[in-house]
Image (cartoon, rainbow, N blue to C red):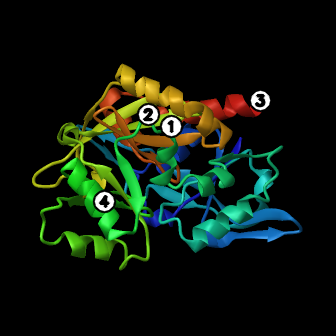
Amino acid sequence: MKLAFIIDPIARLDPGHDSSVACMEAAQTLGHQVWITEMNRLSVVDGQAWGYLQPVQLQPVTLAGDRWLAPTDWYSLGAAEFLPLASMNAVFMRKDPPVNVAYLYATYILDYIDRQQTLLINSPQGLRTANEKMYALQFTEAIPGTIVSRDKAVIREFTEAKGAAVLKPLGGKAGEGILFLDSGDRNFNSLVEISTQQGQLPVMVQEYLPAAKQGDKRIILLNGEPIGAVNRVPTGKEFRGNMATGGRVEPAKLTERERQICTQLAPTLQRDGLIFVGIDVIGGYLTEVNVTSPTGIREIDRLDNTRLGEQIIAWLAASSKA
């Protein structure tokens, strides 16, 4: 197969952590061709999506104790070619958030890929539909108490009712801008004003789950099926468990409640073309559905001695033959 990955500049990626690199490496290991491009190198010509694609060769990471190590020169690139994206068997949209205007326009370009020839992971329409905070709201039985508002009085009333809450910007990633809210905090009004840009932008506010101290579980779903999980535990004085904020990772098994959540989500994810997804669960409650570039593969592989990237590529190969 020929696989294209739309990513951030490859020089910025961390091969020992990045799930995109894990999938590209797995594809190469399984004998497939891997090409990369970036959002700003996409076009529509004659009604088809095109891009400047570069073949990439990767030097696989190796496990050294509790971390993955990569050679200094861990990738090499071939010459760029201007090719129709439909010449690929699959295109992975793996650009990190924020989902801004440039990202939105890129998904419009991806709409012009012939779906009869090429599988998109994830569907551009699904990416537009699934704001990583808002998408979870439709699964009312799975989520904690949650509101979305820009109104300071509404946010205060909710926080007072719940005792404490967590505020999340709707366009954030990697724990950026997430705040712990206590209605008695003298900075409460200022925190809300800054986060909502003086009432211009809505934010998500969820009841604080004390179970967050024991970890925030990332579960990787492939076409609606859970294939691995990792627990991210806050460290020091940090209340966020995100790896980007210093959260410690530890092995994780799925509970029956978490399997029920996955089963509940699966039909909707499949309907929206969301094949590669990472959900976050705290204390048995769904808090987020990550669809743009979910991470966690490297950590799960290291802790559980698995190869999730190879599992994803093998599923893709089987799907393309169906």
User: Mark 1 or 4 closer to N-term?
Assistant: 4
Callout count: 4
Seen as rendered, the residue at the extreme top is 256
Q: In this orientation, which residue lies closer to the viewer: 57 or 49?
A: 49
Identify the residue position indicated by label 1 in the image.
309
Residue at image location 52% in from the left, 43% down from the top: 138
Residue of label 4: 167
Q: Position of residue 322 (x, y in %)?
A: 77, 27
* Residue mark closest to the camera, 1 vs 4: 4
- Which residue is painted at 34% across and 22% down in the image? 255
Report crowding for label 3: few under 14, some 14 to 19, many 20 or more residues within 10 A (C-alpha). few
Q: Which amino acid does label 1 sit on?
A: Gly
Give the spatial CA distance, label 3 vs label 1: 19 Å
Contact, mark 1 vs mark 4 (Cβ under 8 Å): no
SS of the residue at dot 2? Answer: loop
> Residue at the spot x=66%, y=69% of the render?
105
- The mark lying in front, picked from 2 and 4, is 2
Q: Which of marks 2 and 1 is nearer the N terminus?
A: 2
